[in-house]
Amino acid sequence: MRIGHGYDVHRLVEGRKLILGGVEIPYNKGLLGHSDADVLLHAIMDSILGACALGDIGKLFPDSDEKYRGADSMGLLREVVRLVKANGFIVENVDTTVVAQAPKLSPFIEEIRKNISNALGLDISCVSVKATTEEGLGFTGEGLGISATAVCLVV
Ligand code: MG
């Protein structure tokens, strides 16, 4: 068994869609990034790659590569799963936290879990997605960005 950890941050800006865990969430701002900026899936991918010591998403999908402009992070996650499988690893479970002052994420958590469990080929009971605020403190608290952390177990 091996454990992995991932962390990511994206800036919130006007004129972008807010996509978390492959779900488009109604909000007046979205996350800025070269891809769709799905901060949650980015943290999950880095946790899986980290557990397998296979680098990180910056190395795999460089933002200098036009191929990944506007990329669907769900597709990237599926690519990561293929890569770790090819290296003999299977993801067992993931546990994640999204840190956002707003919007409220609880109505979307089940759909997000479903998306992630499909991409990872896991039962939904092995995919945990939690959301929290930082009580108005720091960049997430001020609504300047959203961060996400993920841990996973692979065998
Ligand atoms: Mg990212």
Image: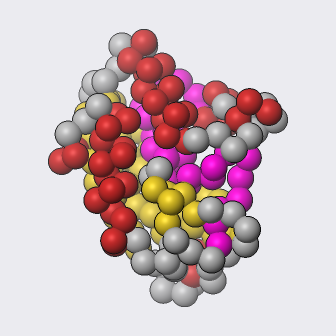
Does residue 27 sit above or below 8 in this rendering?
below
Residue at 63% x, 83% y is 142
Rendered location of residue 16, percent (x, y): 69, 63
Q: Residue 18 placed where, x, y %? A: 58, 63
Q: In the depicted view, which residue is nearer to us: 4 or 89?
A: 89
Give 94 or 21, whichever is nearer the viewer: 21
Residue at position x 37%, y 54% from top?
A: 112
Magenta residues, as a range? 29-56
Q: Quadrant of the C terminus?
A: top left
Q: Nearer the viewer, residue 14 or 150?
A: 14
Q: Quadrant of residue 106?
A: bottom left
Colour pattern? secondary structure
Question: 81 and 110: which one is in front?
Answer: 110
Q: Quadrant of the N terminus?
A: top left
Question: From where the camera sits, is residue 50 visible?
Answer: no
Q: Is residue 131 visible?
A: yes
Question: In screen coordinates, is 33 left or right of 107?
Answer: right
**Image side of residue 62 versus residue 36, left or right:** right
Q: Is residue 44 within the magenta segment?
A: yes
User: Residue 66 at x, y = what percent?
Assistant: 80, 33
- Give the residue displayed 36% in from the left and 44% down from the top: 116
Q: Position of residue 14 (x, y in %)?
A: 73, 72
Please state the total of marks drawn on the protein image. 0
Q: Residue at x 45, y 63 (%)?
A: 98
Q: Quadrant of residue 132?
A: bottom left
Q: Is residue 11 above or below residue 64?
A: below
Vertical placement of residue 121 versus 46, above or below: above
Magenta stretch contains residue 112: no
